[in-house]
Amino acid sequence: MTYANASHTGLKTEWDFSRIYSSIQDPQIEKDLESIVKKCSMFAKKYADKKFVKTASALAASLKDWELLNTQCNPVCLWFLELQKTIDSGNVELQAKITRLSDIYTKAAKELIFYTNAISKIDVKKQKTFLADKKLAPYKYLLKLAFAEGKYALSDAEEKILTEKSAVSHDAWITLQDTYENKQTVRHGKKIIPLS
């Protein structure tokens, strides 16, 4: 991320997001999110049968695909919009777009819950075998975490509900905080200046 120089002070005071997207209306934002949704859907279809938990080779191959998916599906488009919101927190159009696209992203992410849930619920005897397998060595730490969380994992349907409710609650809290912060002002001389 680069900054523009303030001419009178030489300080860098403005973000320049043009390397990411040209504006909040940039059609590439929607295209990038569509690409994420498509990749998540393809991954979900490929591994929906959960056969990847049967052998170390199958699990290793799926984890490699999972790693690639996570690399390719970073929601830069949403990060961009959130950063824009820090600059223009009163922009209703921007907030609406963030909400709409976040909902789409959350829906895509929910379709992948089965994957990590299936790994976390692998039989304890098989877990030990997988942790000792050389094919899974690069993923040993990830697997240990998944196995440790397995005893607390709910069904796929219940995990989807929690994910959805968590996203809604988080968004509501952030909106409340933003609204509060946007109403904050300071008096400078005879002027009242908004902090946002």
Image (tube, helix red, strand yellow):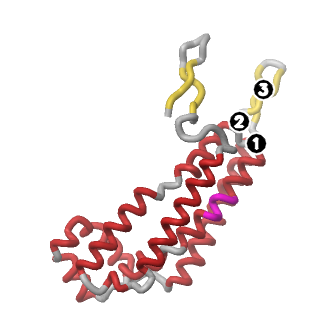
> Label for residue 125?
none
What secondary structure is marked by label 3? strand
On the image, the x and y values in percent for residue 79 come to: 56, 48
Q: Which of marks 2 and 3 is in front?
A: 2
Q: Write the start and end of the magenta stretch as one range.
A: 100-104
On the image, the x and y values in percent for residue 11 come to: 54, 18
Q: Residue furthest top?
A: 8
124 or 65: nearer the viewer: 65
Give the residue at mark 1. Answer: 90
Residue found 70% across the figure and 53% down from its top: 97
On the image, the x and y values in percent for residue 76 come to: 53, 50
- Characterize the local packing of mark 1: few (<14), some (14-19) or many (20 or more) Cα atoms within 10 angstroms: some
Give the residue at mark 2. Answer: 196
Residue kind at label 1, given as amino acid type: Gly
Residue kind at label 2, given as amino acid type: Ser
On the image, the x and y values in percent for residue 51 come to: 35, 85
- The answer to whether marks 1 and 2 mark residues whose Cβ atoms lie closer than 8 Å is yes
Residue kind at label 3, given as amino acid type: Arg
Q: Is the magenta stretch mostly helix, strand or loop?
A: helix
The image shows a total of numbered marks equal to 3
172 horizontally vs 40: left or right: right
Residue 102 belongs to the span the image colors magenta? yes
6 horizontally vs 178: left or right: left
Q: Tell me how far mark 2 sits from mark 3, CA to CA.
A: 14 Å
